[in-house]
Structure formats: C-alpha cells, structure tokens
Image: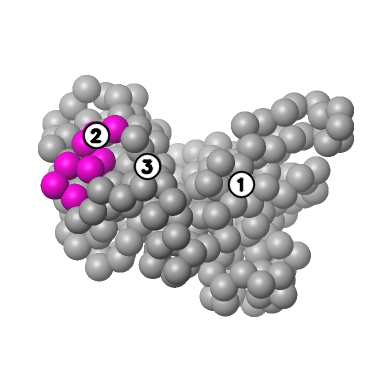
Amino acid sequence: MTDEDYTSMELLTTAASKALDDNSTAFVGTGMPMLAGQLAQETHAPNLTLIYEAGGIGPQAPELAITVGDERTFHRGIKAASMHDVMSHMQAGFIDFGFIGGAEIDKYGNLNSTVIGDWKNPTVRLPGSGGANDIGSLSHQTIISMRQNERKFVSDMDYVTTPGYLEGPGAREDVGLPRDTGPKSVITNLGVYGFDDETKEMELEMLHPGVDEEEVNENSGFEIHIGDYERTPEPTEEELHLIRDVLDPEGIIRE
C-alpha cells in the first residue's frame, strides 16, 4: 500500500485508534477522536468504553455521530448522563484516556488554547479551555492531536491552558495533580511522539510514511529527541474498509 491509497486523516485516525487499549475508558471529542474510538472498538479494543462530553457513556451508536452532543452518542448506552456527571467521573479517576488538542504545545506537552501574546493585548485570542484543562489534568493519560510546525511547537508559551508535565519530572504532583498522569502521545501530520520517562520531554516514537527525520525538528521550535523509532503502520485494507464503508461512509470526518 502506498501513501496515495489513503488520506492524512485516515492515517492519523488509525494511529490514534492504536493508542487506545481494550477494557479501558476513553473521553472522546468531536471529530477524529470519535472516529478513532469507534475504529478501535471494531478492531483491537471491543471492550473499550467511549464517553462523550455531553454525557453519553458506552453507547452502541448505529452510525458515526457528528458531535459529542449528537443523540447517537446516547444510543443504547450504559448511561445517559450529563456533562457534570462525566466530568465528575473524570475527577474520580475513572477515565483512562482523554483526547485533546491545542494551538500551541511545548516540549513537556503543555498546551495553549487561550491567548498568544500579552494577555491584555494579545496577538491572537483563542477559544479557551472548555473542558481541556479537566481532561489534561484528570485523565490518566492524554492523547494530543494537532498539526506540527514552528508556530505550534514552541519553546515558550504565553499561556498554559492545559497542563502537560509542566516544568518537568514531578511538577504535576507538586501542584496537586494525580500521580502517574499526563500526556501519553502527540499525533501530528509528521509522526507520533511520546515522552521520556526520566526527563518528561517529547521524543519521536513513530515517523509517518514518506516523512524524513529532518522534518521533525525543522517543524519544531524546540529540539525533539530522535533515538530509536518505528515507522507508523499504514492503514490496513480492513481499517480503510471500516472507516470508509462502515463508520464514516458520508466522509464527515475522514475527509
């Protein structure tokens, strides 16, 4: 299979789905995370419980929902709860994975989705946190999805909306966040990144097909460690069939 046989979004979706474990819970947001979650259920994680921000828990959706508030996110679910309930479940430690994005990220996985520039007179005013801070603070592990370039991968941020590993090892625990939580993966248009166990700094884990090593740091404002890594597996024919013909036949998300 060549890189012309699938789209960038289909590659990101299959990579994100593989980050989800069976017999776990995942808090999924609108867009690619919903598609990745359902793909994981159809492949390697049939017992994955999907949780939607509007309150749907463990639905058996007949087809892909458009938003987290879509009625299909409640269809034959374990519980039709509320936003307050699912956020409380997260605070209680019941959410294994949380999907999140941001306008900027630094080497410790901290995210900015609030302002760029001076707070009182910003260059860019962004949407803000929403539930992002809760997800990044209280999920056991967060999976971050965003495009990679020097404007988004920055050495210094004007505002931290969502904590990653803050200033490094032990910093999350020092401010009272649950122990052994934090970013697990950063999935971009170039590759998949993890975080070093000792330094908590971002490192390359998988490079997408057709991408060179040089592109990793050429598109980052901070140095990303490149040690041993793998190539991101291309989507299989089964995965593409599920995405295109079963889960998202209208191309709502995959296109």
Identity, as a three-letter code, of the amino acid under mark 2: Glu
Does residue 246 appear to the left or right of 115 in the view shown?
left
Does residue 194 appear to the left or right of 22 in the view shown?
right
In this view, the residue in front, 206 or 80, is 80
> Residues at badges 1 and 2 in contact (C-beta under 8 Å)?
no
| Residue 65 image point, x, y percent | 26, 33
> Dot 3: what SS?
loop
Q: Earlier in the sequence, mark 2 or mark 3?
A: 3
Q: Nearer the viewer, mark 1 or mark 3?
A: 3
Q: Earlier in the sequence, mark 1 or mark 3?
A: 3
Q: Residue at x 32, y 61 (%)?
A: 25
Whole-Å distance between the Cαs marked 2 and 3?
A: 10 Å
Residue 216's label in the rendered image is 1
Q: Nearer the viewer, mark 1 or mark 2?
A: 2
Q: Residue at x 18, y 27 (%)?
A: 249
Q: Residue at x 59, y 52 (%)?
A: 133
Q: Which residue is mark 3?
A: 54
Disc 3: CA contacts within 10 A as few (<14), some (14-19) or many (>=20): many
| Residue 21 image point, x, y percent | 31, 64
